[in-house]
Each structure stands twice: as structure tokens, then as C-alpha cells.
């Protein structure tokens, strides 16, 4: 009896397929799971996959894709597309790149074409202010920040769209691990902001998809 | 010079007016703020207002509205409307009523007509399962739970809409204060769920509004 | 004077022998302890033993057993048996395998034959629902989950047996280390669930043994 | 549409009826819930019900029962019975009485007759040692302690039965709220102990019931 | 032997007198301490003094001053002065008034004349942006905020002066008690901000004084 | 069968009698416990007894003693004695008086005559420095402080005796509840300091007694 | 479109240039950022840069500077200068050297010449007391300590200048990570001390600069 | 000017010399400090020194001593002596050996000859009970435990001497890092126990020395 119960009905049920969490799985289990996907002719995505494991998979699947910054693996790479006007991904600093990339790759995998606005944190607030008109056209904003995590609050006070805030584990001292950024976003005085787990670029992408899927049909 | 800077442009900027947080404000400040709203002919809503303060305000504004369970005050009551099909509010138990009501009143104040599904927590999961078809028609789900906070996870695995999860401070021991429910929702294995602060029915309502405002125009 | 006081009367007193905790012991101490067991003709089990130390022991004891996923070492391997109907081990995802295996090996070492049901987490709840009748025959359920840890709650609302919930350290962000899963299980609205320490598959196995030992005699 | 979904099938499903959590419910909701029980001719139990609310209910239901120490309310009192030999409740100190009583009343309500052994904490260990033979006959031990919570550990090293450990919020300084007692019990070096939430005498009682129900049939 | 050791040399040593912390002192001790100040012809200030204690003192010292919002007591009131250009006190919301007042009264007591800019939090950022030129002339900025505490970060990215950030205990859920605001300020990406304890308007005032005393002589 | 197991052999075993913890005990239990002491002609001490309970006891035992600051009750008052040279109690501020008194009363009850040095905290370090010779003669130092809790560290770097550090719950913001003072004392760079629980003046007194009892015989 | 938005106006706005946080940036991003600085003929400083990354940069920029203790990198080294009388850096122990050096290098980079006083912690308080006159001449004191972090408190009670306290992550057990030192400094009974994040020597340097810039012009 | 301020008067002041904390010091600083000791003809001890650093020192000082389990380094080894009757070191399990050894080496370095009783944890309580008479003769007990840390509580209820409890970082899940053991010891219902920091065998040794030094002269 196989010990894997891949949830192949998930896409029909909730609008997106099961995606594999890589960090805690042993390499043998991952190989078996990919085999099942491959044998069904499906693409598969693995999040938070350490590079040592990825290298072992790339030896088996030579056309597969791996981004070592985001730690994202895909059985088949996705062809890059022109950014569209549905989803904008804002981030506070260059250090947040790994979470930006996780959101970008997830949305590509799910058939979307987000646009990213990086390095626009609030310690130099003109970087956000000068892009307000550009940002106003998007349907959903994913806003990513580490350290004190203030970017979603300021954005939420200036723009009316749904805002999915993503705290990152970037920072040290009290900011180590991302708890401060998370709690700042939850406690924000700019109302109507919603939040996902620390470093969860993937979850933010799926939350954006739930909104678009519901309203675009 | 007045020390109040009511943000009268907020509605134009982000699509909903400033709402007053009542818990930490002294009664004299609240009275002055209400005077300014009244003098402009505007309705005003105060959240988390203790009953002693509310009673003092009701002596001044005899037609005002106060719900002691939700601790919500409004200068002018909102006429109740038939529930619509935009927003459903799910809650795990009767103890979560104060947060359900905060979300309900906020959405009424902002011109919406949510429908609520109470007492459908996962320890008796048939209560949720038997309502799936009914729930599938709504555009946004606000899902409220205290204690272990598992309701949004199970809902998120069964339904495709945007889910705004609200942890409540209902519970004791490790659940005291709502931190467990909050973290459960953030860590949920049912992807694409977003979360607001503990007991923040108001914030969940505004987050739903951001989605509806963006897509309904 | 030896500095080891192996508790050889434990089995007589509480029904199961002393088992060795490997993570913090230096290799020289472990070798001396195993010598004492060997010299008495007894099998011995070590939990949470890092692979580097295990390899040193396997050079001495060539017929010994080591599972690198569960980090379990035994002086003598246990012959695998057909699964019985006393204990079922349920787990939410493939990432929880190391704890599942710790429980399985411990129960084998103690003479029991549990059956495992893996990868049946609540984000695809049909995986649990479709196995309810199969699960109803077992005397004790060990239910293992990481991330938000909701599986024991849903199981506890559907099945009447004793449930020993085991949180795992699988997860990231707020779920890092397993504290959220632990607290979710403690705060569960599905009553009568009991809980052991994070990643403590061994303790859950012994708790099941205490129940079976008491009632099977 | 009633907003209450009392889970009347729970007893059939898991072997014990739904019990009402009183602390966070408003009095009007509680009255409506009791009406539903009363109208069906069923007894009902409410846990952690503050005395002010209890007094309002006792005015309606004059034959009802309320224990202000345990904060337990029952629509109909249970006739006291001779203690049996199934369940023993051990507690460390007189301060733990409110949790002892919660477990006692719950078991009475569910048809059991536990025996209690109070004030036998480990700072005077002869109080436990001298009762070992007496304790050995019981099928399940519920062990309750606050402060440093060491009683379940010592008991677990001496007796072979299933042990359900209940931490209490008794203590001050680092022990305030019961977290130390909880974690001590989870980290216990005496294996096979299981734990419930802080002050959860009710949950411990139901856990004992799950064991007895499974094996006594 | 008196048990009080009032530090009468403090002003000579560090530039400001000892000030009395009121919250945890019993009323008899406070009365004795005030007697010693009175007998030396000195004014005295007590911080965080509950109103019940203040009323007892006001019965003895009829010309004394008490602000129930800031919980500040002074043996002799300070004559109000025109605001100067040394210290500006910025605050995010009306709820922070009690900390603003503590800083204001302390600086008055120490001979300074700060100016306050209230209710200019970042969810309506134009309220800060429109005052930048006005704020640029001050020598020291005390910046007070609760909830997510983002105001010092935004201010620090826009203005060059020394910034003393004061988190307040205003907020609920994760923001309860002020820890989030505190940590946000410590983790701020706007560099060179310094921070004092939660609700410590008094400490911020003294920190400003240390700067002015050092440079104004 | 009585539910109380007063540990009458404790004095013989460890050198001091059982003392009653009052905060969490219900008044009926306390009355029964005191009756047992009274009936054996023994004095009894209760720590952390709220004043409402104390007043009920004083109505029964008119010659009893109660200090509302320390919340200490004794069946029979202890005659005050001249301070001796065995134990000195140092404290940082007047706010720590309730813990100083708990230690003083406990030592009196146990037959000792400590001397106290109050209000000598390190923000005015001359208050400690000027008493060094006076302090050098004592056999044991109990050092009590709240807020940042630095007094034991400075004392420990200057004096060679055994130092029992007692953190107090005096303080606000991060210092609320005494955890900072506790951790400061545990982390002290002045070596050989030992620590007891927050506000545990009683435990510090007994720790001093253990030292004196062992060496004075 | 470049994804970097280097804040070249920062110096004009707040008096100091943007400085690069190195720990979480990938090496390719860092190289691109340095290229932009280099191409503009500007020096650049990177904080908390791991040695592996620094070595890669030193291969490109052979005249660059790297201090492996402070983990500070500069494109161009700064010529060492005689210490001046503006800023003194005090530190408790030799273990705090990495934070001392971060502050020293930052101030050098910004054109200042601080003087350092190392290894003067309070467990040997004569080391501080004997330097009081020497310290009294400086305009700003940066005071650095790990473990229990008491040095700023004692310094603040003895000297009148602005004190910027820096907790370090030096310590183990409860002191691991620096939280105790941080909280001690925030809770200090020596008033008017301000605090920056753990290990934030850089932020303390900038805070000192803000003071000097404001008053020296 | 040297940056080291070795506290050579410490022994005269408090009865024991300064000892060097090794974990956070860079190797160059350590070498310079040892040089100073060597040049004065003094022995020196370093605690918590990582093995890589120790090996570098052993290349310079070929007759030096290093214990890799305790991570203790001494310039000159101490000749082993017969155990005396002043200090007993009790420990719960073999995993605690590194802390036992730290206390043993420290006491040897300071001229004392403790005796150790290892592996006598409370899950097999006969191991402690059978040694009570042997233990009763010692003047001071150092009691070391990880996991749930119950050994000092049980010991303190049975023996009258001063007890210095040392929590260790041995354990996993909630016990990871030693916080549970620490808090258990602080919250102990066995009164008069004092506690030092987690893994602080060195501090416990010095605390014992303070007692012996005070009473043995």
C-alpha cells in the first residue's frame, strides 16, 4: 500500500493543485512523489527545497527548473511572460528577494503574470509615493517586508485594493525570524490588510489566486 | 489648535471612512471627536467601546446605537437589510458571537449585507459539511474561531473562495488571549488563507470590502 | 564506581524497559551503556541518535539496526510483523515520517504491531473521511501532525477511541519548532484528546502501551 | 433560523454528549441553549461558568446544581455514589481543588465514580509513596498539579497505568498561569505520560472515559 | 533609621532630580516621601500614580496637581508656558494621549516647553507629510505610537534630528501591552532611532533633557 | 477521610515547618487547615493571602497577625527582636517593600532576626557603596530588586558572601511581572549569585535558613 | 528596469548615506549594488557581511576593507584618526568587541573619531568608577553590554550625557540572543537611557550622529 | 593602551579569581589575555571554549588541560584529589555530564574536592532514595537536571542542606534550550531551593564556594 495520498482532486475542489513542501521531506519520499506526478504527465512544484536535494532531483530530471534563492523546484520550467495588470508584488528591500521569487514562481506555475516593485521600503518613502499611480491599476497587491515590516501599513493607507501582507525572516536581534514583521502587519492601523505566515510567498500567491478565480469567472 | 486630525479624505483614498477605536480613548476626547462628525452631518462608528463610556454617549445622542456584546457604537443606527450573497461569516461557536457581531455591524455600516453561519466548528464536522453547497455561492468568506482555530483550515480545503480568517480570544490555558488560534491560522496547511489580528472582526470586514470594492466597479 | 545507574527494574515497575535518549550523550558514555546491556544479554534501543554516532556504534555492533529518518538505533533488529488491530498511527503529511517511524520502531521494540495511515491531513479531508470505518476497529489512535496540527481535532470529533496526539516540528515561520501544533492539540475543541511533547513518537508509543498493558491483562 | 447547532449526535459518534463552555458565552445565549436541552428532557452541564451567570440561571432552574469552586453548573444534580476502582484522581495540593472538582463532576455527569487522593505533592514524597499499593488497582490515573508540576513525573516512574496529567494555573511568578506545570509534564523523563490543557479537568475526565469506553465494552 | 534614601544629589550628578514611581508604592510610604520633599521646600513629581492614591494626597496637599489621564502628580503645579522650539512630541493617535501627557508634564517639571503634534499616524500619511517643514526646526523629536508603531520609522526616514521613539500599550490582540510597537521601533529600517520602554513618556523626556543639557551649556 | 495531608514531619526532615500558600486556596479549606494547626497547639503562617480572606480569619482568631503589604498571616504574632548579624536584606526601592516584608516575617517566624537595608538601588550607587563595610559582617545577603534588577550583580561584584537574589514584579512595560529582573539575575556576570522565583521573599528566607542551619550546628 | 532603488538622496534628507545590510542579500545582488556605487565614484559600507561573501568581494575590489570580527566591509578603507572628544564607546567585556567595532567603523565611515573604553563591566565596578572624570568630557556615550546588561544603568546613574545603550547577543542560557540585555536596558531605573536593537552598533553610531549633526551646525 | 582590564583584585574582594568566558571571544583576544596571566605566573581557566579554539591554545601551551565535554580549558592542569565531604554534585542523567564536569573542574580549580552522584533522576526514584544517608553528610548540594528538571524539587523535600539547582539544556520539543527545567526549579514547591542560569555549572560551583568561604573561616 502506497503511503502517499496525493490530493489529485484539489484543483477541482479549490481551484489550484496540491504543491509539495520540500524542507522536511526525505529525498526518497520526494523522488517517489515526483514519479507519481511524472507518470500522470503532470508538472509539479516543490517549495522550500534545499539545494542538496534539488541537485539530486536535477540529475534525474535534466529539464527541470530550480531557483536556489527562492528554493523552488519545478518538474518543467514555465515560459516567462510579459507582466500583466492583475497582481503587483511590492517589496521593501533587496534582502526580501527570496520571498518575492517564491510568489513570482508560484503565480507563474498557476498561470499568472505578476509585476514586481522591489526595494521601495518606507525609510525612503519617496520610492513608494512616486509609484502610487502605477500601482493603482492592479487588482491585488502582495506586499512583502522584513525588519519592522511597515510597508503594508503605509501602502494600506494610500491604496484601496486588497493587500496581502507577507512578513519575511529578514532582520536580526528582535527582528530575527520575522516575528516582529508579522505582528506589525497584524496590528496595523491601516485597516483591511490581511496577512500570511512568515516567508510564505507561496501562500500569498494562492490567496491572490483565490480572489482572481472568484471574480474573474 | 485642535489636537484631532480626523482623516476625512480616507474614503476617497482607500474606499472606506475612518472608524474610531474606542478602548483606549478617554471619554472627553471621544465626545469631541463625535461632535466633529455630528457637525459635519456624518454618521460615525466606534469599535471596542466599553459599556460605561457608551452609556455616557447615549445620554448625549439618544438615537444612537450600541451593541454591548460587540462593543460597537454608532451615532445613527443602520436599518437592517436582508442578507445578500456577497459575504458569508462562518463561526465555530456561540462564544465567538462578539467578533461575529463586530464584523456584521461594520459591514452594515459600510453598506453591505453579510449572512452569518454560526456554531459550525470542526468538533462536529457534519455542521460544516452539510452547508457546503449553501456556502459555495458567496464571494468572500470570513471565518471566525477561537480555541484551536481549525475551522478556516478545514473550510480552506473544501471551498475555493478568498478566506479571511479571524482568530478570537475565546479559550483558556494555552488558548487564553487567542494566540493559538492566530498561529494555527497562519500555519494552516490549507493554502491561500489570509489572517487578521485576534478579535479583529472589523478588520476582516474592511478586508472583504477591499475585495468587493475592487472587483464590483 | 560506575556513574551509570541503568534502571533495570523499570520493566517490573511500570511495564516497559528503560530506553536510552541519544541526542545529548557523548559517544563514550553511550558505548559503555551498550556494553552493560550487551553483557546482560539484553536488547537496547536508543532514540534521537545522530547518524555520526550511529555509524560508530554500527562498527562495533555489526548486526545492529539504525533508521536514519527516525534516528532510532537498536542493538538487535526486530523481525517485522503483520500489522494488528490494537494501535493505528495516523499522520497528516509525508514530512511527519520521522515521528511516525519513531512510534513504529518503539512499538515493535516493545512487542506490538501498529498499523500506519499516512498523508491524510485535513486540507484534503476526504482522505480521513473515507477511512473512518477502517479506523473504528483500533483500540488506540496515535495521531501525528505538524504545521497547524488540526488532524487530532477532526479525528477526535469523529471517532470515540483514546487519542494520543503528537505535534511535530514540521513547519516554518510561526510553525517552526512545532509549538503551534502542540498548542492547537492542547486547546482542541474536540474533547478528551491527550498530548505528548513535540516529535515524541516514542512517548506516544509508551502511552499506548500503558493503556494496552492495563486492559489486556 | 436558530444560530445554535447543538451537536445532539455527539454521544452516538464519540461516546459522550456535547458539554457547554460557559466562560465566554453571554447570558442570553446560555439561556437559549439550556431551553433547548430542557425542552428535549436532557440534563446539561456547563463548565467554567462565572458565579454571576450561574446565579441568574439558578433563578430560572431552582433544582439546578452549581459548584462555585469548580464553576460547574448542571441542570439536574447527580446523586453522589460510592467511589469505584476505575479512575483515581491524584492532586498535589489543596489549591488544585477547583480542577479536581471539575474532573469529579464531569465524571459523575458521565456516569462514573472516581476516587480522589488530594494534597500528596512531591515536596513531602512519603504522602505518595505510602499510597502506592492503594493506587495500583485503578485503571486510569488523572494526576493534577500546579507550580512546578512534578507529581505526574514521579507517579509515572512508580506506577504502570495510563496517566493523564493536568497542569493547573496555581502558582505565581514564573508559575503564573500554569505554563511551567504544563511544560514540565510534556517534558517529563517518566515516559508515556499524556497531558491536557491547563486547568482542563473536564478534558482529562473525557480522556479517561475514552479509555474506559473502548475497553469496557 | 529611616528606610528612605532619597537621592538628593542626583540633580548635581546627572542633571535632573529623582522622580517618584507611584504605581507599586503603598500610600503610607508615598506620604512619608512627600513629607521629606515638603520639609526641604522642594517640589516633587510622581509618575503612574493611580487615582485612588492621588485623591488621598490631594486631601493633604490642596494646591497639588494631578492629571488622571497621565496619572501624574506634582506637589506644586507648574505654570503653563508658550511652546518653544527645542522639543517636539509627535503621536500617532488620540489613544496615545496618556503618554504624550506624561512626557509633556515631565518636561514642564524640568523647565522645558515642548510642542505636541497629535494624531498624525501613518495610516493617513499626509498628516505627517504636511508638517515636515514645521517639524524640521526642533532639536529633538519624541515620537509616540501604539499598535504597529510605524510612525518613528517613517519620521526617521524623512527628518535628520535625534528621534526618541516611545511605544505605547495601546492596541489589542498581538498589540496588547505594547510589545509589537516596541519591537517595531527597535527593528526599524530607518536608522539611528533610539527607543525607551513601553509607555515611558517620562524616560523619553529625560533622554531629551540629557541631549539638551549637554549641548545647551 | 480528610483531604488534607499536612506534612507534620517536614521540620524534622528539612529543618523548617510546612507553610501555607494562601492565594489559590478557598476560604473553607484554609479554615479547616488552621483548625488542624490550632488543635495541635502550633503556630501557622500563610503567605500571599488576600486581605478579604485575612479579614475572615481575623474574625475567628482575634489575636492573629496580618500584614496587608506582604499579605502574610500568622495564627500567633511573633515578638519583634533586635536585628542580628546573620542575614541582611538589601532592596533597590521602596516599591519592593512587600517582598522585603515577606522575607522579614518568614525569618521571624523561623526564629531569625534579619536586618534590612532599603532603597539602595544602583541608579544612585553611592547608597550601596557607603554601606559596604556595614554589609560585610553578615553571613548571608538577600538582595531584592524589580525593574532591571541590577542590584544583585553590583553587590556580587563587591562582596564575598552567599547572595540570594529575589526579583520582584515591580515595573511596567517590558518589566511588567518581573521577568526581566529574574533573567538579569540569572544572567549576571557577577558569579556565584543564586536566584529564587519572582516575589518569592519567603523562598529566599528559607534558602538563607538552609545555609544557617547547616553551618550553625 | 533595475530592481535596485538606492536611496541616493538619503544624506541630503537625514544627514547620512544609505548603508547596505549584508546578511540576507545574495552575492549577485550585492555585486550589482556595489557596481552602482563604484560607477558613481562613491564609497560604500556593508554591515553584517559573512566572511565567505566578503572574500568574493575582495577578489573584485582588491583595495577594499573587511573586518571579520565586526563583519564590516568598505569599498575604500578609511584612514585611522586620533580619537576625539565627541563620542565615547564603553563596553562591558572583551566578548562585546564585534559590536564595539561595528560602531567604531560606522563612525569612521561617517567622518567621526570616537574613543573606546573596553572591558569595564559592573562585576568589577572600580573599572568604571576610576574613569568617570575621563568620561565626563564626551558629548555622547554609547554603552555596550551583553549578559545581564547592567553597564548602561550604572553609567546612567553617574554621568549626565545622552546614553545610547546597545545590548549584545553575548551570553548563554536565558541570555542567549541578547533579549535579557535588551530588556534590562529598556527597564533601567537610571532614567533617560535610550536603546537600540541587539548587536546594533551601527544604529547606535547613527543615533550619535543625529545628535552631533543637529547641535554642531 | 591595552583594551583588557583583567580584574586582578577580584579574589581579594569576593574570594575567587576572574574566570574567562570563552564562547564569544575571538581567538586573538584570548591569546593576549592568557599571555597576561602567564606573564604573572598565574593559572587561568576558560569556560565554554569551543574545541577549535582550544586546539589552537594547546599548540601554544603544551601542558595545558582541555575537557571537550565540559569545554573547559586551564593553563595548568589540577592534580586530582580524593573527593571530600563538603560538596555533592547530583545529576539526573548521563546527558547532563557536560554541566557536571563544568562544576567539577571549577571546584578543582578553586581548591575544592566535590563528589558526584550521577544518573539518579526521578523517573527511577529508588536511585535517589537509596543514597539519602550518604548525601546527608555534605554541606552543600549542587543538583543538576534537564528535561522536566524535577530532581531538585524531590531532593529539596528530603534533605535539609543548601541546594543550588542547575537546569541544563538537555531535552527537545518544549524542553529544548533548558527553559522548562529552569522554570520548574524556580517554581518548585520544595522551598528554599536556589537556582542559577541554564548550563551554568561554573556559577553553581562559585555559589557553593561563597557559602563555604563564609562559614569555613
Image (spheres, coloured by chain):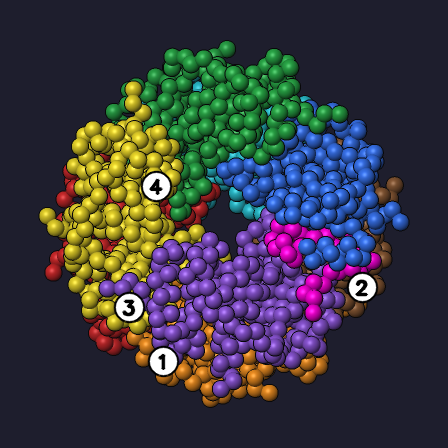
Chain colours: A brown, B blue, C cyan, D green, E purple, F yellow, G orange, H red
Q: Quadrant of the N terminus of chain H?
A: bottom left
Q: Position of residue B86 (x, y in %)?
A: 82, 39
Q: Residue at x 53, y 45 (%)?
A: C177
Residue A5 on the magenta segment? no
- Observer-side mark, 2 or 4, equals 4
Residue B19 on the magenta segment? yes
- Observer-side mark, 4 or 1, equals 4
Mark 4 and mark 1: span between their CA atoms? 47 Å
Report whether residue D121 is seen.
no
Q: Position of residue D130 (x, y in %)?
A: 25, 24
* Other-residue count near label 2 (Cα within 10 Å), few / some / many at <14 / 14–19 / ≥20: few
Mark 2 and mark 3: span between their CA atoms? 60 Å
The chain to which mark 4 is attached is: F
- Span shown in magenta: B1-30
Mark 1 and mark 3: span between their CA atoms? 18 Å
Which residue does the numbered mark 4 point to in the structure image?
F49
Whether pointer 1 and pointer 2 mark residues with C-beta atoms closer than 8 Å, the reply is no
Residues tagged by mark 2 and mark 4 found on one chain of the structure: no
Which residue does the numbered mark 1 point to in the structure image?
G132
- Observer-side mark, 4 or 3, equals 4
Which residue does the numbered mark 3 point to in the structure image?
F128
Mark 2 and mark 4: span between their CA atoms? 61 Å
Between H132 and F217, the residue placed more toward the observer is F217
Residues tagged by mark 1 and mark 3 found on one chain of the structure: no
Q: Secondary structure at mark 1?
A: helix
The chain to which mark 1 is attached is: G
**G19 horizontally vs B129: left or right:** left
Residues tagged by mark 1 and mark 2 found on one chain of the structure: no
Report whether residue B64 is seen.
yes
Label for residue A132? 2
Amino acid at each position: 500500500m502506497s503511503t502517499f495520498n496525493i490530493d489529485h482532486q484539489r484543483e477541482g475542489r479549490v481551484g489550484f493543485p496540491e504543491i509539495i513542501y520540500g524542507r522536511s521531506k526525505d529525498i526518497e519520499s520526494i523522488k517517489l512523489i515526483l514519479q507519481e506526478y511524472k507518470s500522470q504527465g503532470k508538472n509539479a512544484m516543490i517549495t522550500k527545497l534545499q539545494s542538496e536535494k534539488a541537485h539530486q532531483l536535477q540529475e534525474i530530471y535534466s529539464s527541470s527548473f530550480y531557483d536556489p534563492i527562492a528554493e523552488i523546484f519545478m518538474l518543467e520550467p514555465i515560459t516567462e511572460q510579459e507582466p500583466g495588470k492583475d497582481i503587483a508584488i511590492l517589496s521593501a528591500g533587496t534582502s526580501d528577494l527570496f520571498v518575492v521569487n517564491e510568489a513570482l514562481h508560484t503565480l507563474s506555475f498557476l498561470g499568472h503574470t505578476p509585476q514586481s516593485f522591489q526595494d521601495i521600503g518606507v525609510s525612503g518613502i519617496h520610492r513608494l509615493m512616486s509609484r502610487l499611480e502605477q500601482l493603482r491599476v492592479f487588482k491585488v497587491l502582495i506586499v512583502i517586508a522584513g525588519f519592522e515590516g511597515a510597508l503594508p501599513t503605509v501602502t494600506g493607507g494610500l491604496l484601496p485594493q486588497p493587500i496581502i501582507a507577507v512578513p519575511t525572516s529578514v532582520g536580526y536581534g528582535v527582528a530575527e525570524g520575522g516575528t516582529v514583521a508579522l505582528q506589525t502587519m497584524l496590528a496595523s492601523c491601516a485597516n483591511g490588510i490581511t496577512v500570511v505566515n512568515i516567508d510564505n510567498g507561496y501562500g500569498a500567491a494562492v490567496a491572490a489566486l483565490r480572489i482572481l478565480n472568484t471574480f474573474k469567472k
